[in-house]
C-alpha cells in the first residue's frame, strides 16, 4: 500500500517513513486492535510484511483522511456514528 502523500519510493519498494504519534485509547480498544492485527497477520496469504496494531492504525488514519468530509458531529460518539453510517453500519454504537 502506498498512500497518497507518503514518502515511499514506489520504484524501490521502500516502506514509507513513519513518525510516532501518541493516541490515548481505551483498554477494550487496545485488546480488540491487537486481536484483529494478530488475526489478520495469521491469515495473510503472502508472508512478508507484518500486520500490527500500528499497521491498522495507519490504515484507519488513511481512510479517515481520504473520507474526512463524510464526518459530522460535535462529539466522539456523533463522529463515530457518522463514520459508521458512511461505512454502511446500521448500529452506531458498534463495539461500545
Image (tube, rainbow, N blue to C red):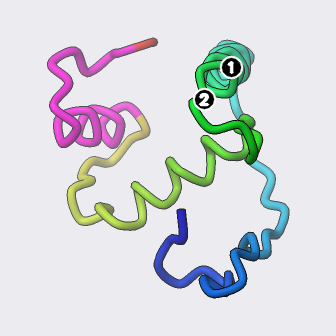
Mark count: 2
Q: Is residue 61 left or right of residue 95?
A: right
The quarter of the rendered structure image containing the C terminus is: top left
In this view, the residue in front, 4 or 82, is 4
User: According to the image, label 1 marks what residue?
Assistant: 42
Instruction: Please provide percent x and percent y for residue 49.
Output: 74, 47
Q: CA distance from mark 2 to mark 1?
A: 6 Å
**Vertical position of residue 8 compared to residue 72: above or below:** below
Q: Of helix, strand and loop, which one carries label 2?
A: loop
In this view, the residue in front, 75 or 38, is 38
The residue drawn where x is 22% and y is 37% is 87
Does residue 90 belong to the magenta stretch?
yes
In this view, the residue in front, 55 or 90, is 55
The region drawn magenta spans: 77-94
Residue 6 location, quadrant: bottom right
Dominant secondary-structure state across the stretch colored magenta: helix
Does residue 52 belong to the magenta stretch?
no
Q: Is residue 74 left or right of residue 43?
A: left
Q: Is residue 21 left or right of residue 78?
A: right
User: According to the image, label 2 marks what residue?
Assistant: 44
Q: Of helix, strand and loop, which one carries label 1?
A: helix
How packed mark 2 is, by other alpha carbons closer than 10 Å (few <14, some 14-19, many 20 or more), is: few
How packed mark 1 is, by other alpha carbons closer than 10 Å (few <14, some 14-19, many 20 or more), is: few
The residue drawn where x is 72% and y is 22% is 34
**Vertical position of residue 69 compared to residue 82: above or below:** below
Is disc 2 in contact with disc 1, using a CB cutoff of under 8 Å?
yes
The residue drawn where x is 47% and y is 79% is 4
**Vertical position of residue 17 compared to residue 11: above or below:** above
The residue drawn where x is 70% and y is 32% is 25
Instruction: Please provide percent x and percent y for residue 58.
Output: 61, 54
Instruction: Please provide percent x and percent y for residue 53.
Output: 72, 35
Amino acid at each position: 500500500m502506498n498512500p497518497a502523500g507518503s514518502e515511499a519510493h514506489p520504484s524501490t519498494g521502500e516502506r514509507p517513513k513513519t513518525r510516532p504519534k501518541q493516541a490515548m485509547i481505551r483498554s477494550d480498544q487496545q485488546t480488540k486492535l491487537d486481536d484483529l492485527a494478530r488475526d489478520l497477520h495469521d491469515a495473510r496469504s503472502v508472508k512478508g510484511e507484518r500486520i500490527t496494531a500500528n499497521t491498522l492504525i495507519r490504515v484507519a488514519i488513511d481512510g479517515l483522511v481520504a473520507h474526512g468530509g463524510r464526518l459530522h458531529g460535535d462529539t466522539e460518539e456523533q463522529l463515530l456514528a457518522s463514520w459508521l453510517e458512511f461505512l454502511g453500519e446500521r448500529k452506531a454504537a458498534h463495539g461500545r
